[in-house]
């Protein structure tokens, strides 16, 4: 039985994204390396590693980010959720194609190499969202120069972002009034604020804190602190620290392990399908 005929793009968009060299490579693999051709790894290399990454990098560069309300880790994760759904949809279609009964070599070496190619395919799709998430995080980190941000953070952390600190008083707040106004304008988007003794600095007309935590006797969160720590976490990404690093960089190794497991399962499934078809 001959291998399946080479796929032909069915619409103009896909045809435009499939360069001539990729079609020639597809035909060459079909004739000379049919077991590689069956994995469609060359299409993964082009669409996932080249086309998708270029598109995602452009989107990350053009995505609007408000200086006073940049997305946090949860926000960036939500942005990449659609990429994960799209990737899994593509993978499921590809897996269904790989499970079609075929005749071909069943040597252990071929199965091993096929499994490695499967792993590369899974892994390329798994890490695609990083081409969007990492540049977005870098843009968040670049909103404020490092030296300027370090000075701001040290000042406002000293009094726990002007909320419920034992050394905080109207006198201290008045002493740092200019710095508070500048910080609120830079990180929150407003300058005016009010302060009640033994309480928190609040943005006039819009409380700087969220819901009150009765167990701790203080606000559950403070908008100024939330915004500044979010930028700090983004700046820590490439230093191996912070929430952005934990969410987007640390899982890279886990994604490789998961890809190996899925690749092994798919290799065994295709091998079984091949045996049942003969």
Image: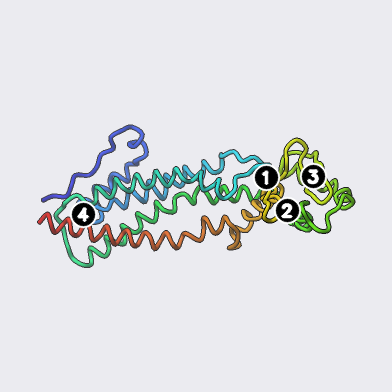
Residue 97, position as x, y percentages in the image: 24, 47
**235 sits left or right of 197 in the view:** left
Which residue lies at the image location 17% right of the left edge and 62% below the top edge?
106
Q: Nearer the viewer, residue 210 or 51?
A: 210
Marks 3/2: CA–CA distance: 12 Å
Q: Which residue is mark 4?
A: 34
Q: Which residue is mark 3?
A: 182
Q: Residues within 10 Å of mark 1 (few under 14, many from 20)?
A: few
Query: In terms of sequence position, does the residue under pointer 3 or pointer 2 come before the other?
Result: 2
In the rendered image, the vertical position of residue 64 relative to residue 1, given as above or below: above
Residue 210, label in figure: 1
Residue at 81% in and 58% down: 166
Badge 2 is on which residue? 149
Q: Nearer the viewer, mark 4 or mark 1?
A: 1
**Camera-side residue: 135 or 266?**
266
Q: Secondary structure at mark 1?
A: loop
């Amino acid at each position: 039985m001959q291998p399946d005929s080479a796929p032909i793009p069915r619409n103009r968009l896909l045809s435009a994204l499939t360069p001539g060299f990729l079609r020639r490579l597809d035909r060459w693999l079909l004739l000379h390396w049919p077991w590689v051709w069956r994995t469609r790894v060359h299409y993964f290399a082009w669409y996932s590693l080249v086309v998708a990454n270029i598109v995602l990098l452009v989107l990350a560069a053009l995505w609007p980010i408000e200086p006073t309300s940049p997305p946090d880790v949860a926000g960036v994760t939500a942005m990449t959720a659609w990429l994960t759904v799209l990737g899994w949809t593509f993978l499921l279609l590809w897996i269904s194609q790989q499970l079609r009964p075929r005749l071909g070599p069943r040597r252990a070496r071929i199965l091993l190499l096929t499994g490695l190619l499967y792993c590369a395919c899974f892994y390329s799709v798994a890490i695609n969202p990083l081409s969007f998430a990492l540049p977005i995080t870098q843009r968040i980190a670049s909103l404020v120069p490092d030296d300027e941000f370090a000075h701001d953070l040290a000042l406002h952390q000293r009094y726990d972002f002007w909320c419920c600190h034992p050394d905080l008083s109207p006198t201290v707040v008045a002493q740092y009034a200019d710095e508070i106004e500048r910080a609120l304008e830079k990180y929150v988007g407003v300058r005016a604020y009010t302060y009640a003794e033994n309480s928190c600095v609040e943005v006039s007309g819009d409380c700087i804190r969220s819901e009150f935590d009765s167990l701790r006797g203080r606000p559950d969160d403070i908008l100024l602190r939330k915004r500044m720590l979010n930028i700090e976490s983004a700046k820590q990404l490439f230093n191996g620290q912070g929430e952005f690093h934990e969410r987007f960089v640390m899982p890279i190794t886990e994604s490789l392990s998961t890809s190996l497991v899925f690749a092994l399962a798919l290799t065994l499934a295709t091998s079984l399908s091949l045996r049942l078809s003969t």
